[in-house]
Image: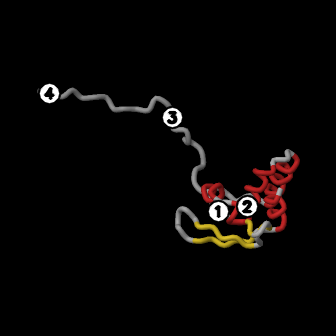
Amino acid sequence: METPNLPAIRALRPAWNKGRIVGQKRPLNPKHVWAIRVRLELAENHRDLALFNMAVDSKLRGCDLVKMKVVDVMASGQIKERASVLQSKTQKPVRFEISEGTRASVEK
């Protein structure tokens, strides 16, 4: 019994990242960081501002940021000056300092 030669399977559409630059992106400039902060403050988006400030301070991945609990950054009714979080990818603790502006945004 002969098996027929099947035509090669081709994608119906081009790849989504064809012609785009992939890989690690350049870090944000300080003026871009301040522009994002100002826009979040003007929009009164307190949650996103607190998350953005924590991301800048801690340099954690997004999945680790959203897993953080109030207990990680707060003790006895006040925001801690230093916090420690266990990274999900490497299972290593990361200690970071929480700046004054971040403490104010988290408190709101």
Q: Is residue 88 left or right of residue 34?
A: left
Residue, x 77% and y 56% (percent of image)?
A: 50
Residue found at the far left of this picture: 1
Instruction: Sort mark 2 into few (<14), some (14-19) or many (20+) by Cα contacts within 10 Å.
Output: many
Identify the mark nearer the N-term, 2 or 4. 4
Quick one: quadrant of the N terminus? top left
Q: Which mark is residue 14?
A: 3
The residue drawn where x is 59% and y is 71% is: 93
Q: Residue at x 55, y 71 (%)?
A: 92
| Pointer 1 with pointer 2, Cβ within 8 A | yes
Q: Which residue lies under the disc numbered 4?
A: 2
Q: Residues within 10 Å of mark 4 (few under 14, many from 20)?
A: few
Residue 108, position in %: x, y?
83, 56
Q: Earlier in the sequence, mark 4 or mark 1?
A: 4
User: Which secondary structure, mark 2?
Assistant: helix
| 71 with respect to 92 (left or right) | right
- As measured in the structure, the alpha-carbon distance from the residue carrying label 2 to the one carrying label 4 is 65 Å
Checking the image for residue 60, the label placed there is 1
Q: Secondary structure at mark 4?
A: loop
Q: CA distance from mark 3 to mark 1?
A: 34 Å
Task: State which mark lies toward you, 3 or 1.
Answer: 1
Q: Which residue is mark 2?
A: 54
Amino acid under label 1?
Leu
In three-dimensional space, the C-alpha distance between marks 3 and 2, rounded to whole angstroms, equals 38 Å
Q: Which of these two is toward me, 54 or 71?
A: 71
Residue visible at 82% across and 54% down in the picture: 37
N-terminal label among 3 and 1? 3
